Amino acid sequence: MSEWPALERSPGGIFSPLTDNTFRFKCHPGIECFNRCCAGLRLILTPYDILRLKNRLRLSSGEFLERHTDIDEENPSRFPMVKLRMTRDESRSCPFVTRQGCAVYEDRPGACRLYPLGRASARTPGEERLKEKFFLVREQHCIGFQELKTWTVSQMQNHEGMPDYIRMNY
């Protein structure tokens, strides 16, 4: 049995393993699906995501949480999950997405930075090192995988500024 069983039960098969640590992907304003990944989300925010966003918006922590989040206290982990509140219209889009892209791009959440990669992490009691597993999130609407840009996980993490996010959250 795998130590990552939840990934193997991927809803709709959208999570696919990275077999050789490389993948092709590029997102840009000229691509037909631009911004479609920013709708219909259940985006869980980390403490560092909240810190970056509340500072960007010049809000106190309380103001940011009140205006832009929903707290999910009914989840299997028994810890409250803070989710970004999506628009209340039919698209259920991120409140920070515009036709031009992300209005908070420099301070966007870690999950947005890493897309189309997904990241699972776990720490074994008594071990210092964090275990990580990366996978591709292949949503039907996304055609960025047809682009020619090739990445490794490490290249994507560094390009998108993920080392700071990972360090600050663990």
Image: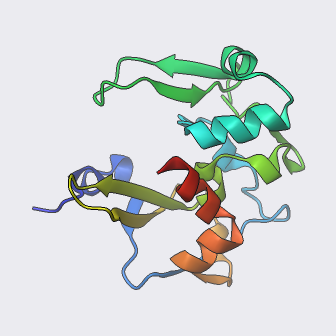
Which of the 4 image quadrants contains residue 76? top left
User: With respect to residue 42, does 151 lie above or below?
Assistant: below
The answer to whether residue 141 is visible is: no
In percent of width and height, residue 23 lies at: 53, 79
**Which residue does the image show at 69% across and 64% down from the upper left?**
161
In percent of width and height, residue 88 lies at: 69, 18
User: With respect to residue 106, does 90 lie above or below?
Assistant: above
Residue closer to the observer: 106 or 42:
106
**Which residue does the image show at 78% across and 64% down from the upper left?**
31
Q: How many marks?
A: 0
Horizontal arrangement in the rendering, residue 106 relative to residue 41 (left or right): right
Residue closer to the observer: 79 or 151:
79
Q: In which quadrant of the rendered image does the N terminus lie?
A: bottom left
In percent of width and height, residue 77 lies at: 30, 31
**Which residue does the image show at 63% across and 22% down from the upper left?**
69
**Which residue does the image show at 76% across and 55% down from the upper left?**
34
Horizontal arrangement in the rendering, residue 144 relative to residue 166 (left or right): right
Which of the 4 image quadrants contains residue 48? top right
Residue closer to the observer: 148 or 56:
56
Horizontal arrangement in the rendering, residue 167 relative to residue 32 (left or right): left
User: With respect to residue 161, does 98 lie above or below?
Assistant: above
In percent of width and height, residue 68 lies at: 70, 22
